[in-house]
Amino acid sequence: RFLKAGVAISCAKGMKPGTPNQDNFFVTDCGNFLLCCVADGHGSAGHWVSHWTCKFVLRMMLEQMEKAKSLPTTKAMMEIFEKVHKEVIRTANSEKFEVGLSGTTLSVAVIDREKRKILLAWAGDSRCVLGRPVKKGVISRLASGPSGKSDYV
């Protein structure tokens, strides 16, 4: 199903024994738009943080895109990332879940198929990579966000 949308996913648990897989993602097909998100948790509650981050990002992006009927702007993405951060902290506090030494990176790609535009956004040291198959088993990188840089969009 993902391949039909042009999305490939690979996920592997980290090497720390006793630690759950802390990766979460979603791929959502919304008519003209395809939303993709990957969150890579870290710390003792990284799995919890990445899970809730994906849930909140999806909800907030769908709300914003329904209202705007277009790709989110850079300003809108920065606001979504800030709201998600606050919502994860609020949820952790209400559920009495300690996340002080945990967190997640976040990579988001939104594709507008009709206008043939794409938005890439990230937080932390993860990045989005846009590629195109050039021959069987070989993908050419077209664009990517910076690696090792902690910032927004």
Image (tube, rainbow, N blue to C red):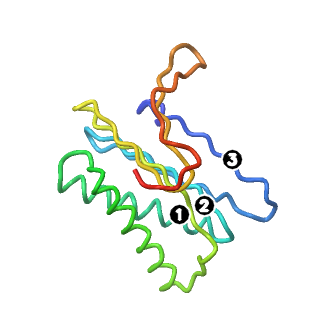
What is the C-alpha distance between the residues marked 3 and 2? 13 Å
Q: Is residue 28 left or right of residue 100?
A: left
Q: List x then y, in percent, for residue 143.
A: 45, 31
Q: What type is the residue that disc 2 sits on?
A: Gly
Tell me the SS state at disc 2. strand
Q: Nearer the viewer, mark 2 or mark 1?
A: 2
Closer-to-camera residue (25/108): 108
Pick the residue in front: 81 or 24: 81
Q: Secondary structure at mark 1?
A: helix
What is the number of the mark on residue 108? none
Location of residue 34 in the rendering, given as x and y in whole percent from the top left corner: 35, 41
Residue appearing at x 56%, y 44% in the figure: 147
Q: Which residue is mark 2?
A: 41
| Rendered view: 76 above or below 8 | below
Sequence-earlier tag: 2 or 1: 2
Q: Earlier in the sequence, mark 3 or mark 2?
A: 3
Q: Give how far across and how far down residue 138 sits, in percent.
A: 58, 19
Q: To which residue does mark 3 refer?
A: 12
Q: Secondary structure at mark 3?
A: loop
- Taking the spot 53% from the left edge, 35% from the top edge, the residue there is 8
Q: Are marks 2 and 1 in contact (CB under 8 Å)?
A: yes
Q: Residues within 10 Å of mark 2 (few under 14, many from 20)?
A: many
Q: How many marks?
A: 3
* Spatial CA span between label 1 and label 3: 16 Å
Question: Label 3 amino acid?
Answer: Ala
Residue under label 1, please give it.
51
Q: Earlier in the sequence, mark 1 or mark 3?
A: 3
Q: Residue 133, percent across and down? A: 50, 20
